[in-house]
Amino acid sequence: MRKTILLLFVAFLVIGTSLIWYLNQENTTGSETIEWLHFTIILIVVAFALFVAIQRYRSLQRGQPAEDEMSKKLLQKTAALSYYISLYWWVALLFIKDRVEFDTEQLMGSGILGMALIFAVVAVFLHFKGLGDE
């Protein structure tokens, strides 16, 4: 139960600080679109965290353990698959950086947010598809 409450607290903290960050940005030419995209990705990742928190809460309500063998295996497969996809994401970002002018901060932010988004998408995909060997 503590992990679920902590996850919800961190999710709302991220939403609050991201909103403050987004509202205090200086609008320079061309960076407004990237910042808006970053903020949208942050909201998607927080929505994923809320999805996980709701699942854990429902499991606790049914009397099931929060982490069992199936959820650990799902997390391990999610981490492995998202790691490989993230490697290609960084290669694509470096390819784009050579052709388009990017600030270093925007490149790093896009890379990290992309990795988080890839993890969330793979986790949701595997959650609904299943592991295939259960």
Image (cartoon, grey):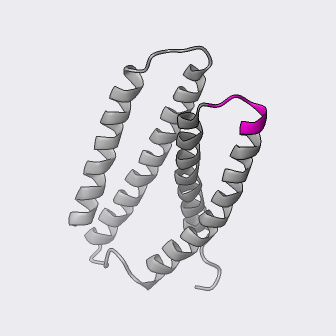
Residue at the spot x=38%, y=34% of the render? 18
Query: 133 and 25: which one is in front?
Result: 25
The answer to whether 120 is drawn above or below residue 35 in the figure is: below
Residue 43, by quadrant, is top left
User: Is-magenta flag for residue 64?
Assistant: no
* Quadrant in which the C terminus is drawn: bottom right
Indicate the position of residue 42 as horizontal and vertical percent values: 47, 41
User: Is-magenta flag for residue 98?
Assistant: yes
Numbered range of the magenta stretch: 97-102
Residue at the spot x=32%, y=35% of the render? 17
Residue at the spot x=38%, y=51% of the render? 50
Indicate the position of residue 49 as horizontal and vertical percent values: 40, 53
Indicate the position of residue 25 as horizontal and vertical percent values: 42, 21
Left or right of residue 14: residue 93 = right
Query: 43 and 131: which one is in front?
Result: 43
Report how many numbered discs are placed on residues in the image.
0
Left or right of residue 106: residue 84 = right
Residue at the spot x=59%, y=67% of the render? 126
